[in-house]
Image: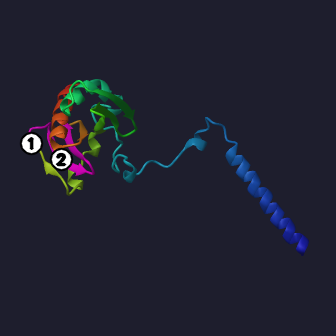
């Protein structure tokens, strides 16, 4: 009886090893091996029932750093002529440019994000202040040390502009809106 129990345990261990090795040895291009669960809304995905591609413009193809150069951002945040850098980042559901402006031994940061229209959801927030005179609609929020101005651009994308002060964020949003409006 002890031999039967040992044989059963050994058999189960061998089966487990075979399954484990089979899972690890799938080909790199095997679509079954590379499938993963779709992103969730909490991970920044498009809302349920949305394909994330309903915007007239593909936000992933926008080059925000080229549309709004670092020199222009430096001028808006009050450091015209200062050294700076711009770092683009394109993702599945958004694209952005992060600006670092260096002046007087300190650094100031600003960001411009572009999102598809499906992610424009001001009603989902309770901390907004509506802003008039920007785009089709706009609102302001504060997040940590940044003021964020969210602007609906020509009804097909929206931009989220982040800067250190409300005045900087508004001015940068106006600049970004001018560059995004009518730009395919």
Q: Residue at x 32, y 33 (%)?
A: 100
Residue under numbered circle 2? 140
Q: Secondary structure at mark 2?
A: strand
Q: Residue at x 52, y 47 (%)?
A: 36
Q: Position of residue 143 (x, y in %)?
A: 26, 50
Is residue 73 within the magenta segment? no
Q: Residue at x 20, y 57 (%)?
A: 126
> What's the magenta region?
132-154
Q: Is residue 184 visible?
A: no
155 in relation to 13, above or below: above
- Left or right of 64 in this view: 139: left
Q: Position of residue 122 (x, y in %)?
A: 21, 50
Distance of mark 2 from mark 1, alpha carbons? 10 Å
**Quadrant of the rendering where the C terminus is positioned:** top left
Dominant secondary structure of the residues highlighted in magenta in the image: strand
Residue furthest to the left: 133
Which label lies toward us, 2 or 1? Answer: 2
63 in relation to 19, above or below: above
Is residue 153 within the magenta segment? yes
Q: Residue at x 28, y 44 (%)?
A: 118
Q: Position of residue 71 (x, y in %)?
A: 25, 24
Residue under numbered circle 1? 132
- Left or right of 93 in this view: 3: right
**Quadrant of the rendering where the N terminus is positioned:** bottom right
Of pointers 2 and 1, the one earlier in the residue sequence: 1
Circle number at residue 163: none
């Amino acid at each position: 009886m002890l031999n039967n129990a040992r044989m059963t345990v050994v058999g189960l261990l061998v089966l487990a090893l075979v399954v484990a090795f089979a899972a690890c040895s799938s080909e790199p291009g095997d679509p079954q091996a590379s499938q993963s669960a779709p992103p969730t809304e909490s991970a920044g995905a498009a809302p349920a029932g949305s394909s994330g591609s309903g915007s007239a413009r593909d936000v992933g193809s926008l080059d925000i750093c080229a549309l709004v150069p670092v020199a222009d951002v430096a001028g808006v945040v009050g450091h015209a002529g200062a050294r700076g850098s711009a770092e683009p980042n394109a993702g599945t559901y958004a694209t952005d440019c992060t600006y670092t402006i260096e002046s007087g031994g300190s650094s100031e940061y600003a960001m411009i994000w572009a999102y598809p229209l499906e992610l424009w959801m001001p009603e989902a927030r309770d901390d907004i202040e509506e802003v008039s005179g920007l785009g089709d609609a706009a609102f302001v929020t504060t997040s940590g040390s940044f003021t964020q101005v969210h602007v609906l651009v020509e009804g097909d994308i929206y931009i989220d502009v982040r800067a250190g002060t409300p005045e900087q964020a508004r001015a940068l949003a106006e600049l970004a809106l001018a560059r995004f409006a009518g730009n395919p």
